[in-house]
Image: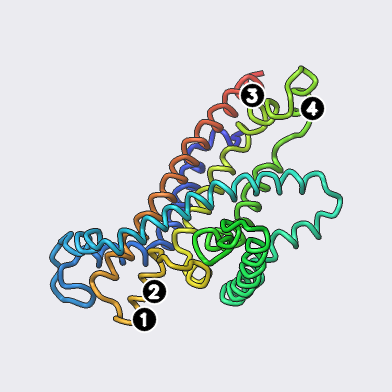
Amino acid sequence: MRDDYSSELGHKLKWAYLLSIVFALLAPVFYVIYISFNEYGFGARIYEFTTDWYRVVLGDTMLVASLEWTLYLAVGAVATTIPMGLMSAKLYKRTRHKVGFVTLMLSPLFVPADILASSLLVFFKHLSAAFEWLGGALGQGWLQTWFELGFLTALIGQIIYTLPYAFVVILITMSRYHPQQTEAARGCGANAWQAFWQVEFPQIKAGVFSACAFVVILSFNEATRTALLKGGFDTFSNVLVSQMLNVGMSEESYAMGGIMSIVSMTVIGSLIIYTLIRSERLERVARAKAEPLMSG
């Protein structure tokens, strides 16, 4: 009698099917990258490979600055959203009002991006005026500049946008973890941090890394919320959208789209490779545990 662990062909077919679906979904992305290396641009009958358009983009100081701001926002979003997602997932496990908690966590996804960004813009305008008055009343000038449109407000907008995704991904992984292991570690003398870092985190780190990948991709490609909340700087997505609206699709636009696509695919590819390696390792462990039972 055959079992799941002995079906190597079925295992490989499963991953082949998954990769084929991913490739089909990413076909437009591959096409954008393909066009971005054509010297004659989109629609040309002649294709001649060149990296000139990437040199033009990376040689533009404004575009490089926008790319740097995009990376800063992505790092800031990951550094704040992932811990918040972890804490939210742990709170969900403990609360009795699970439906209400999930509804609250996912509520930003139910609001259109432009409406949410406009609401945050009005909120930050009033909050900035309140802090400006408070700073003047207290004689603290540094308070007056808080919540002016800038990096902080753009980061808050991205946190609100990416947190639901991080929460869901981490929660799915955490649902497979048995809290009794934490209780056992605490019973052996470990404090709360040691129990989490040494016992729980190794078992949920795949979900944490997946959440990081989601946040990076979402932050890197986000444009609507950031456009209204960013203040005096531009992100790469905002520059690309502005150029498409004002100039149209040019060779530089395809190169910019190629850069965004390459970054996203690198993150996705790294996640897939990590998942494959982890899956193979878990498969070997499960097979090693099953062999004595099968032989008996």
Circle on res. 183 = 4
Choose mark 3 or mark 2, whichever is in front: 2
Q: Residue at x 57, y 58 (%)?
A: 141
Q: Residue at x 41, y 48 (%)?
A: 269
- Helix, strand or loop for disc 2: helix
10 Å crowding of disc 2: few (<14), some (14-19), many (20+): some
Could you tell whether 253 is left or right of 213 in the image? left
Circle on res. 36 = none
Q: Where is 189 relative to 49, above or below?
A: above
Q: Earlier in the sequence, mark 3 or mark 1?
A: 1
Residue 295 in percent (x, y) is at 62, 19
- Helix, strand or loop for disc 3: helix
Q: Residue at x 65, y 48 (%)?
A: 84
Q: Residue at x 42, y 53 (%)?
A: 71
Whether tag 4 and tag 1 are in contact, CB under 8 A, the answer is no
Circle on res. 245 = 1
Could you tell whether 42 is left or right of 183 in the image? left
Circle on res. 294 = 3
Choose mark 4 or mark 1, whichever is in front: 1
Q: In the rendered structure, which amino acid carries the disc numbered 1?
A: Leu
Whether tag 4 and tag 3 are in contact, CB under 8 A, the answer is no
Q: In the rendered structure, which amino acid carries the disc numbered 3?
A: Met
Residue 274 in percent (x, y) is at 47, 39
In the picture of the structure, the residue carrying the numbered disc 2 is: 241
Q: Earlier in the sequence, mark 4 or mark 1?
A: 4
Q: Where is 80 relative to 280, above or below?
A: below
Q: In the rendered structure, which amino acid carries the disc numbered 4?
A: Glu
